[in-house]
Image (cartoon, coloured by chain):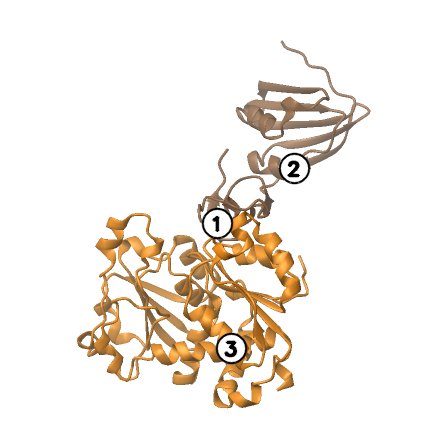
Chain colours: A brown, B orange
Amino acid sequence: MLKVTGIQKGIVIDHIAKGNGIKIFEKLNLAKVNYPVVLLINVSSQKLGQKDIIKIQDNVDIDFTMLGLIDPKATVNIIEDEKIVSKMSLEIPKEVTGLFQCKNPRCVTSVDDYAVPKFTRVENGKIQYRCNYCEELTEYKL
Amino acid sequence: MNQTVKHLVDPNDFTVEEINQVIDLGLKIHSNPAQYARLCEGKILGPLFYEPSTRTRLSFESAMLRLGGQVLGFSDANTSAVKKGESLADTVRVLDDYCDALVMRHPMEGAPKLASEYSTVPVINGGDGGHQHPTQTLTDLISIKYYKGHISNLKIAICGDLLFGRTVHSLLKTLSRFENITFYLISPPELKIPKHLKDYLLDTYDVSISEFTDLEDCIEEADILYMTRIQKERFLNEEEYMRLKDSYILTRDKLSEAKSDLMVLHPLPRVNEIHYDVDRDPRAKYFEQAAFGVYVRMALISILLEVADHA
């Protein structure tokens, strides 16, 4: 069995749904950082059958909003001295800024660099966001 | 963003109470304009029109001039620094030093909201793409208040381009906050109101919405008939426009089924959706409506510039 050691300090993103690990890895730009990062895929899990895990050493400053958007069921463990010092559950964010584009081609955010796309989640059972500028609904998809 | 400055970029920027305040002041100005003729002396309104406009721009300019103020702006983006590639935010950050309030028309939806985030003076949305046109709504409401005496317990039929019609979107969003409003929405299937707007209205307000494709199916029930133009400039496909442009033509014959105290409104300009013979019908109020646009904008400017109490 493949064995990956724990980290001394940093973040472990656990219980990532199988297949989402690589997406989170890409969205958080983890290929470009200069601290150690481990991406584990298809790890056995009692809860999920198989899961993905990301371990990030030395850095705890990541975009939890983005994480909640991609996989709200993932969990985040903050590690210090090789121990979990806090456990966080993620949730689908109510407000999102700059993480994706408004689908309306007539929206000012599509043409003006000053207009950073900002959205507010609509409570309709889907992951849909209302643009704060043009009000069009955009469904978030990876 | 300057949180203390009051803007009108979305109908919901004003509470129902504030909307009533604007309308009531507009009616007062209408009955005695001379009393308000010097209210904005020394103030400058900046119309920033990135898209063509006749009524909105000129009624704002007329309103400011009738209040004793002055106007300084542009009606063609090609004659401004925009042509050189200046961003909207930069334009606004300069012009808010030159003017006491800005009125913006822009083809991109949400542009006035973006402007309001950078402006230190009030920004008024004079129409943004197919999104919103809140001051046309104030014009519609002051007309309704003047002729009906109230803005509640009304059945309002709205006919034409409900998909791209920004006047329709603002009117729906505003009237839905008043009491006991029923909407009959008449359009070709291709031009129904945006689903996100319909869902928002039904989820947020206690309002009734029925949709039709034939005007005849609901005209006899309506207290107000709000006709709109099928807007050629919003279509990407000329063929589609040609197919839909004559979807609704209101004639005196069709009005024979309607109530005797019906009000026919139209934000103007019209093309052929209201036949000229309807103009002679006493129920046609669209030219009076356009005239009220000046008075209600006088009220709005006075309130945003915080001089309304000085009359």
Q: CA distance from mark 2 to mark 1?
A: 27 Å
C-beta proximity under 8 Å, tags 3 and 1? no
Residue drawn at x 73%, y 22% is A35
Say whether disc 2 or disc 1 marks the residue closer to the N-terminus: 2
Measure the C-alpha gap from mark 3 to mark 1. 30 Å
Tell me where residue B15 appears, x and y as whole percent: 56, 71
Q: Quadrant of residue B25?
A: bottom right
- Point out which mark residue A107 bears: 1
Quarter of the picture holding the N terminus of chain A: top right
| Disc 2: host chain | A
**Could you tell me which residue is drawn at 72 percent across and 21 percent down?**
A34
Q: Amino acid at mark 1?
A: Cys
Closer to the camera, B53 or A96? B53
In front: label 2 or label 3: 3
Q: Amino acid at mark 3?
A: Ala
Residue count near mark 3 (Cα–Cα under 10 Å), binned few <14, some 14–19, many ≥20: many
Q: Residue furthest right?
A: A81
The residue drawn where x is 23% and y is 75% is B276
Q: Quadrant of residue B21?
A: bottom right
Report which residue position mark 2 lands on: A64
